[in-house]
Image (tube, grey):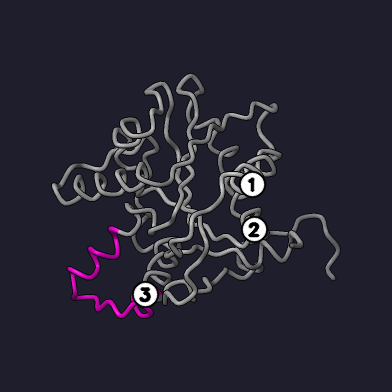
Amino acid sequence: MDIVEAIRMRKSIRDFKPDSVLKTILRDILEIAVRAPSAENSQPWEFTIIAGDILDNIRQTNIEHLKDGAPLHPDLHAEGLPPESVYRRRQIEIAKQIFQLMEIPKEDRAKRDRWMERGFRYFNAPAAIIISVDRSLHYPRPLFDIGAVTQNICLTALSYGLGTCIGNQGITYPEVLHKFTGIPESKRIIISIAIGYPNWDFPANKIVSNRESIENITTWVGFDER
């Protein structure tokens, strides 16, 4: 697949077919993805690939923690978007699209909660990629590099007919991942990627998110007017 086509086609997949993904395919994707740039070639990323019963145990325990009201405490803490900002507006716009397609009324708290739980279950994907970094690396130095390799994974997956969804809900209880995967405490868990074959019958997978006009977010300096 042409790289430009892949960039234009990539979207967040929020439900997957149950078909498993071969380990050889996931290995091929990672071998391509690690060509991502990193500061001074530091290559700070480390991958843990989860599937099968282990992934099911993580899903179940995440949901148990969530329903018990356990505080969310991801290693990578992200503040909420500023209220009344353009960033918050964009977030609300995509949420409205999703809830409309999924027929989730604003006042239906139970349906909204069930939707939120999907992220803690890695959107029912047959596999998940957990990306972590060593705690000896000063935060937030490696985050740009992790973003680059994450994008590479998602774009490369398209060439294998796979979809992805980048998410932080699946890593908000890091002790669950440490317990079931053996990721050592010396690693900071940064992000997760749900990966599998898309379920195109799922309504939310039909979304094509909007992008801001380049004219609204770009300043040209030193160019002739053309």
For the residues marked 3 and 2, what is the alpha-carbon distance in whole angstroms? 31 Å
| In the image: residue 51, left or right of residue 216 | left
**What type of secondary structure mainly makes up the magenta span?**
helix
Q: Is residue 170 above or below residue 163?
A: above
Q: Residues within 10 Å of mark 2 (few under 14, many from 20)?
A: some
For the residues marked 3 and 1, what is the alpha-carbon distance in whole angstroms? 33 Å
Residue in the image at 38% along x and 79% along y: 101
Q: Is residue 203 above or below residue 30?
A: below
| In the image: residue 185, left or right of residue 147 | left
Q: Which residues are magenta?
A: 98-117
| In the image: residue 72, left or right of residue 166 | left
Q: Which residue is mark 1?
A: 29
The mark that comes first in sequence, 3 or 1, is 1
Q: Which residue is mark 3?
A: 96
Image quadrant where one finds the C terminus: bottom right
User: Of tags 3 and 2, which is closer to the observer?
Assistant: 2
Q: Is residue 61 magenta?
A: no
Q: Are marks 1 and 2 in contact (CB under 8 Å)?
A: yes
Disc 1 marks which amino acid?
Answer: Ile
Q: Which residue is mark 2?
A: 160
